Image: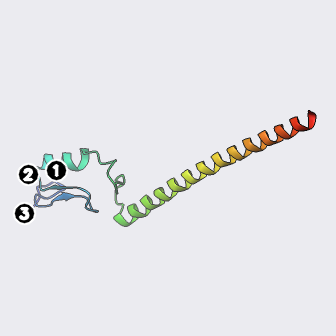
Amino acid sequence: MESAPGEVVAQFYALNCHMGVWDEGVSGSAQDRDTIINLTRRGSSCFFFPHHPAMLFAAAKELQKREADNEKIRLSNLYTRIGLFVAAGALCVNALVAYLKTTS
């Protein structure tokens, strides 16, 4: 089965995720396939990475891994900053209590 000129996806290809998260099966018309491929929002699906022309799956996997690692680091840094603010606050309270004890 040959695809029509200008048609990107041939009739016999099933539309599915490379990682197996979703599978749309085989759709009948080129318009249905175009809508499913290009207009279906999949941003909340796991393993989703925005399309970049000519990007290979290996590169997308690496970029997604880096993005996940950076998110973990950002969260860890947030917790560290919170801990530092709590410690600084405790030191200020301790200094104030010590000062009040010496003046009374």
Instruction: Give percent across and percent down for residue 33.
Output: 16, 50
Amino acid at the residue labelled 2? Gly
- The kind of secondary structure element at disc 1 is helix
- The kind of secondary structure element at disc 2 is loop
Give the CA separation, mark 1 to mark 3: 16 Å
Instruction: Give percent across and percent down for residue 40.
Output: 25, 45
Tell me, what colour scheme is on the image? rainbow
Amino acid at the residue labelled 3? Met
Kindly identify which numbered label has been placed on residue 1.
Answer: 3
**Residue 25 located left or right of residue 76:** left
Instruction: Give percent across and percent down for residue 35.
Output: 19, 45
Q: Residue furthest right?
A: 103
Residue ID at (11%, 58%): 3
Circle 1 residue: 33
Residue ID at (12%, 56%): 26
Residue ID at (57%, 54%): 76
Q: Nearer the viewer, residue 94 or 26?
A: 94
The C terminus - image quarter: top right
Tell me: residue 13, above or below residue 92.
below
Kindly identify which numbered label has been placed on residue 28.
Answer: 2
Amino acid at the residue labelled 1? Arg
Tell me: residue 50, above or below residue 12.
above
